Amino acid sequence: MYRMPNIDEMVAVARELGIHLGPDEAVFTENI
């Protein structure tokens, strides 16, 4: 089963991709 990333992991990946997510956006991304 795929483990959902936590907020810190999402932010780290987003920064690598040049995207800056706010907390709400990070939560939304996890729920896709």
Image (cartoon, helix red, strand yellow):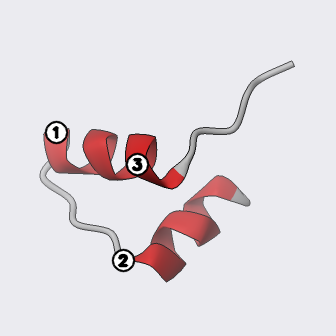
Q: Secondary structure at mark 3?
A: helix
Check the image and name the residue furthest to the top: 1
Residue drawn at point x = 21 percent, y = 59 percent: 19
Residue drawn at point x = 18 percent, y = 49 percent: 15
Residue drawn at point x = 36 percent, y = 77 percent: 22
Q: Quadrant of residue 3?
A: top right
Which amino acid type is marked by label 3? Asp
Q: How far is mark 3 from mark 1, CA to CA?
A: 12 Å
Q: Secondary structure at mark 1?
A: helix
Which amino acid type is marked by label 2? Gly
Residue drawn at point x = 28 percent, y = 42 percent: 12
Residue 9 coordinates in the image, percent (x, y) = 42, 40
Q: Quadrant of residue 1?
A: top right
Residue 31 coordinates in the image, percent (x, y) = 73, 60
Circle 2 residue: 22
Residue 28 coordinates in the image, percent (x, y) = 61, 70
Q: Is residue 25 left or right of residue 14?
A: right
The reply to whether callout 3 and callout 1 are in contact (CB within 8 Å) is: no
Q: Is residue 23 left or right of residue 5?
A: left
Circle 3 residue: 8
Q: Residues within 10 Å of mark 3 (few under 14, many from 20)?
A: few
Q: How far is mark 3 from mark 2, CA to CA?
A: 11 Å
Q: Is residue 28 left or right of residue 15?
A: right
Residue 32 drawn above or below residue 16: below
Q: Nearer the N terminus, badge 3 or badge 2?
A: 3
Residue 6 drawn above or below residue 1: below
Label for residue 16? Answer: 1
Residue 24 drawn above or below residue 8: below
Q: Residues within 10 Å of mark 2 (few under 14, many from 20)?
A: few
Q: Is residue 5 left or right of residue 25?
A: right
Q: How far is mark 1 from mark 2, CA to CA?
A: 15 Å
